[in-house]
Amino acid sequence: MKKVLYFLSAMALMAGFTACGDDKDPINNGFDNIVEDGFYVTGEATGATEITAEWGMAAGINEVDVTTRNGMFEKYVWLEGGKDFELVYYAAGEATRYSSALEVPTHLPEGDGDQPRDAFRRGVLVVGADAPAMQVEETGFYHIVLDQNLGGDLNNPLILVAPARMGIRGDNNGWGFTEATMNRAEDGTITWVCEEVALKAGQGFKFAYGHGWKIQLDDAGNVKANTNLGPTMTPGGQTNILAEEKGIYKITLTYKNAGGSFDKSFSYKMEKTADLVLSVPENMYIIGNEFGDWKWDSADVVTMTPVNGADGLFWAVRYMTTTTEFKFCSVKEWSGDFCTLGENSGFVTPGNNKVEADGLYLIYVDANDNGKIIVKPAPLFALGDAFGGWEATNAGQIALTVNADGTATATATAAGILRAYVQLEGVDPWKSEFSAKDGAIIYRGNAGDFNADNAVSLTAGQTATFNFNAGTATIQ
């Protein structure tokens, strides 16, 4: 690539790097105070009258494999609308101009739905004296991504400029998006504040912009730029920012322009402003791609069974595969929905919850205080006269057999009524019972004991088969 050497006059420096019209002002002398080679954002739109280290770009992270991508660079920056800016690569005393004719793309890659909803501009990278200056229409905070396509996996090298409307995504809003209130001080320091954020201990969030997680640069989805920040204030597969104790929080994100990695520009703080008073939900529902197809009015949304006499405890048993996705809510609407609580085990949360192996699972939610979600292979047992006795011990019950089709079966060893339950830690068996009636599974929940009206009598050798996904039960 041919390097283009420029010389910057003092007048051009004071005016900013507009590079408008046919006269491309030389820029090399503007780097007199720069000691590190790299890419820099310059121009009148930055409001700067000289090039300093704070305008240096960060090495880009490919969200797909969470590694530094060769030839990719990023920068968050405040830009004035209607004024010119450009990127400049400075190395070995030479400066090269990088820019693009930015346009709103007419075609967007078929991404995974996690891309920001605000319109951005992109264009093919142009290098050298003829590279056009860039502009944004509105003054504001922007995310600039340069990808030189050194690996040849994009259609072309590009520059992308996206409006960065910052906010938080987390357990407080069901991992949706809450836009923050922005303030920019005279010295250029920007703060974004979200108040009245309710979090339980162990719940978390990330900062993000435009309701997104990433921007996809290619049709195949092999290259994506992160649009979120975690606890280290750098992008790329981080853990969430967590609340150490339950409370109502004021969350502040602060930006002060600095060169290099994002953690040099961004910082945050959490201030607990009030105690969190939790109300125990009366109901709990599971929604997902196989549980109502994400439609709350679907009859296939799972109504979880309450633990008898225990407020805030709910359970369900369902067969799930690695493609099953799900989350929870105490009402059938997108308000207060959640994926995690204070303590979580047995699932992963890449946006929605998933299990890592096919199987029949217990899904258990403790919505009290700090909260708990447990997903594990369903511990199903039958007891009573038909199954060896009434003691909830290995000698007084039998485990149900889980079949390849996701059903569970229990075969009576003597005459007696059908009594089965899912084993919950610290919960008596009768508080999580289920049985069969008229071909359907019936759950005790907060109802009374299984009696003559709803008890099923078995003889020795009869087998009860439960299909929890279909809600059916048969006796043969």
Image: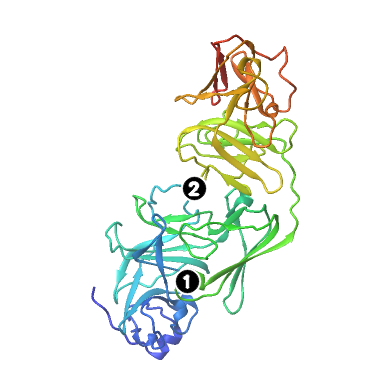
- Comparing 59 with 446, the one in front is 446
Residue reaching furthest front? 395
User: Are discs 2 and 1 less than 8 Å apart at CB?
Assistant: no
Q: Is residue 20 left or right of residue 470?
A: left
The image position of residue 49, as x and y in percent, is 47, 84
The residue that label 2 is drawn on is 350
Q: Quadrant of residue 122?
A: bottom left
Residue reaching furthest left? 2
In the image, residue 334 above or below residue 59: above
Q: How many marks?
A: 2
Tell me which amino acid carries mark 1.
Gly
Which residue: 61% across, 24% down?
395
- Comparing 395 with 135, the one in front is 395
- Comparing 135 with 79, the one in front is 79
The residue that label 1 is drawn on is 82
Between the C-alphas of marks 2 and 1, the distance is 39 Å
One can see residue 115 in this view: yes
Tell me which amino acid carries mark 2.
Pro
The image position of residue 77, as x and y in percent, is 49, 71
Question: How would you rate the neighbour count of disc 2 (Cα within 10 Å): few for under 14, some for 14-19, many for 20 or more?
Answer: few
Q: Quadrant of residue 2?
A: bottom left
**Earlier residue among tags 2 and 1:** 1
- Comparing 294 with 79, the one in front is 294
Q: Is residue 149 left or right of residue 249?
A: left
Disc 2, SS: loop
